[in-house]
Amino acid sequence: MDGMNRTALMNGADIIVDHLTKQKVPYLFGLCGHGITGFMDAAFKAQNRIRTISTHHEQTAGHMADAYYKVRGEPVATFTSCGPGSANLVVALAAAMMDSSAFLAITGNVPTGQFNRGPFQETGRHFQGDFPSVIRPYVKRSYQPTRADMVQLAVTQAWDQLTAGRPGPVNLDVPLNVFVEEAAVTATAPSRPVINGAPGNPKELSAALGLLLKAERPVIIAGQGVILGRACDALAAFAERANIPVVTSPNGKGAIPDRHRLAFGAIGRNGAYAANDATKNADVILAIGFSFDDRATSAWLDGYTLSIPPSRLIQIDLDPSEIGRNYPTEYGILGDAKASLELLLEMAGGRIGGTRQGGAWLDRLEKGRAVWRDYQAGLATSDQMPLRPERLMAALARAVPEEAVVASDVGVHHNWIIQLMDTMRPRHLIHSWGFAAMGFATSGILGAKLAAPDRPCVAVVGDGSFLMTPHALATAVEYDIPVVWVVWNNNGFCSIRDIQHGMFGGRELATAFEVQRTGEPYSPDFAAMAKSYGVASHRVTHVGELEDAIRTAVAANRPYLLEVPVDREIRPIGTGSWDLPPLPNPEPNFLKALAARGLSL
């Protein structure tokens, strides 16, 4: 190294790995291929600084990186080869992009000297080396350095882009020769993480606060932006100071503990009764870091989850494209969630004399919450087999340690988890919400455990979603990653089966897992499958063993699969709705179910 200029010759792959290690990235998740071998050689040389985890499918690597960020709030990197290798990553990139989850996707490409010649696995029909076009909708940005002297700037910009503003995945697409060719590199200090710390406009916040404090029926909706912005403590402090009820979006579960006196659950299609009651009857709503997506709003149907107007909306968000996108705002405020809430709290100190009284509004919501819990608790005492879903949810609540990370895969079990799981802190529950990628939790739980090695990590996965990426079990054994999979076995793609039954008169096709010749329900022997991978396993056969079986799986401190048969004919109760135009939307059925059991509000 030149003492004056501090330059050195480095190949492109070493430049990338050196940058990652300076950023203290602990892991690389990926899968080999000829187009990525140059990068893998650099990772080999840096094994004492960054650990490589090899998966058996690229989708698993992406879900692991996504889950790692969801749990720890710090990005890692994936590596995949050209052609099908990186194409297999697309689902995981899309899932991360839709949930504002960040990781650096390093993809190999064909050598630049072979561009436009149709070499093996080139995406080049319309433009040479054109993999970035494949993933354009699913990353914040792609960088494609085509010379080694372009790599340092590309990797620096790519890394900084991950968490700037709204987090999301970024692609660094590198031709094979650029990984191994050398360039003179000037040593640089690692860049500092981008901090999104600016509050919204103080005058607008002050005016919005005045509107909120004068409201008779105010409510706060906390979205995922509260968690991403590390604003949960500020949210609780402000809600307590103003004595305003709080609900969350499904993706914001954990922004406030579900057992907090002012917490009334998640809203939307599978929301809790009191949560939807609060938002559709509020006169003023403060929404923070919430995108108003269809499943969280009962598909924007008026009067099911929201009634805006007449409800008056105050919306605070870091992303200007979200403000006013789905509902008109009284005050649309661009700003960081934490800084804005802290400023609101400071402003509120001089405008509230003592604790604000919630009066009849809070009494109403508290009664709705109590009746909802009583109704669900009554169903959770059932000893039927296959299990009622409420019984399994109650067992998970009792047997999974409170400090655990719980990952939900996609399927009807996901709806039950949103509705019934008490989420007690940020990142307690992780899931794929916006893109709803099946396989997320089956694979992602490995990344969650690497992000939180001192906490139990439990994936609740449907039989359908588990079969998408079962090879994650092999990776867990190879790298001794002690996680638990609870396979919610209901013999089918039952969230879609339920839609067929509800909207198409009971006609179903290709959603139930059955032996076609006999019509008998079918599933693989998941416990035996796990044993074939070297994973400890057990199949629950009677209700009395359920809690002990879950505790045993967690306590084993090794990869462990627990299969639990669940009744597929029992569907989540509805307090909201969902719309698939032009099909008619289902009506909420909770109040009818309540009356049928002799209960009332």
Image (cartoon, helix red, strand yellow):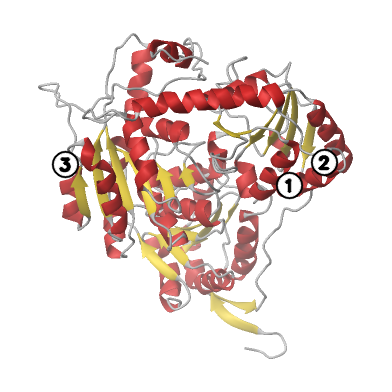
N-term-proximal mark, 1 vs 2: 1
Return the x and y of residue 548 as percentages of the image width and height.
26, 47
Q: Residue at x 46, y 77 (%)?
A: 46
Between the residue at mark 3 and the residue at mark 2, the CA separation in whole angstroms equals 58 Å
Q: Nearer the viewer, residue 309 or 35?
A: 309
Looking at the picture, does residue 34 appear above or below residue 185? above
**SS of the residue under disc 1:** loop
Q: Which mark is residue 407?
A: none
Between the residue at mark 1 and the residue at mark 2, the CA separation in whole angstroms equals 18 Å
N-term-proximal mark, 1 vs 3: 1
Return the x and y of residue 520 as percentages of the image width and height.
14, 24
* Amino acid under disc 3: Asp
Return the x and y of residue 445 as percentages of the image width and height.
39, 52
Q: Residue at x 74, y 31 (%)?
A: 357
**SS of the residue under disc 3:** loop
Looking at the picture, does residue 251 appear above or below residue 102? above
Q: Nearer the viewer, residue 381 or 32?
A: 381
Mark nearer the viewer, 1 or 2: 2
- Please rate how many residues cluster around mark 1, counting C-alpha atoms within 10 Å: few if below 14, some from 14 to 19, many from 20: many
Q: Which residue, given by chain and number where applicable, does mark 3 sit on?
A: 525
Q: Which residue, given by chain and number where applicable, does mark 2 sit on?
A: 348
5 vs 34, left or right, is: right
* Amino acid under disc 1: Asp
| Residue 345, quarter of the rendered image | top right
* Amino acid under disc 2: Ala
Q: Which residue, given by chain and number where applicable, does mark 1 sit on?
A: 336
Looking at the picture, does residue 34 appear above or below residue 473? below
